[in-house]
Amino acid sequence: MRLLLWILGLGNVGNGCWMLANPEGWYRNLPARVPDTGPLNLHFVRDIGCAYTAVGVGMCVAAEVPAARRGVLYGATFFYVAHALLHVADITAGRLPADHWLVDLPGVFAPAILLAILCLPRFHRA
């Protein structure tokens, strides 16, 4: 669990810092085809960059503080599952192309599923 939280945490911090430091580069170069979601809004990208950075820092702390893991996982899972459900709604409503089921799989859907699994009681010590 510790290593996984470090990997997820650093990935989130890296993504968030990229969003904060270079929102236009993130918008144009992330393989997830972000421009499909609408025009670039620099402030909005930076806002979400703050969220990813916060989630990532929380995961890194939880990697080293086992007592914090459950709460951090629940918070991070809520963020990722809500994000994934937003993508499901946009794809099914036609606001995103149907191929986003695959485009969004690695960066949106898979992390939400993984985090939901990690919230299962079997992964927490009593």
Image (cartoon, rainbow, N blue to C red):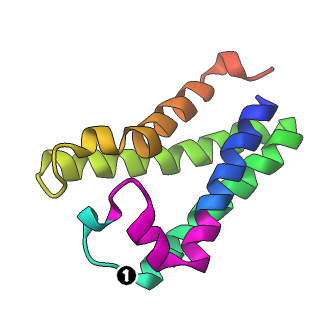
- The residue located at (43%, 78%) in the rendering is 44
What is the x, y in percent for residue 124? 74, 23
45 shown above or below 42: above
Task: Say which element carries label 1.
Answer: loop
User: Is 91 covered by the magenta stretch?
Assistant: no
40 shown above or below 123: below
Question: What range is drawn magenta here?
Answer: 16-34
Apparent side of residue 120 relative to residue 40 in the rendered image (left or right): right
Quadrant in the picture for the C terminus? top right
Which residue does the numbered mark 1 point to in the structure image? 41
- Identify which residue, 105 or 55, lies in the foreground: 105
**Residue found farthest to the left:** 94
Q: Alpha-carbon neighbours of circle 1 within 10 Å: few (<14), some, or many (≥20)?
A: few
How many marks on residues? 1
Residue 41, picture quadrant: bottom left
- The residue located at (88%, 42%) in the rendering is 64
- The residue located at (50%, 68%) in the rendering is 48
Residue 121, picture quadrant: top right
Apparent side of residue 87 relative to residue 2 in the rendered image (left or right): left
What is the x, y in percent for residue 23? 49, 77
What is the x, y in percent for residue 97? 16, 51
Q: Amino acid at mark 1?
A: Asn
User: Is 17 covered by the magenta stretch?
Assistant: yes
Apparent side of residue 30 relative to residue 89 in the rendered image (left or right): right
Quadrant in the picture for the N terminus? top right
- The residue located at (46%, 45%) in the rendering is 107
Helix, strand or loop for the magenta stretch, by majority: helix
What is the x, y in percent for residue 56? 68, 54
102 shown above or below 9: above
Residue 53, picture quadrant: bottom right
**Residue found farthest to the right:** 64
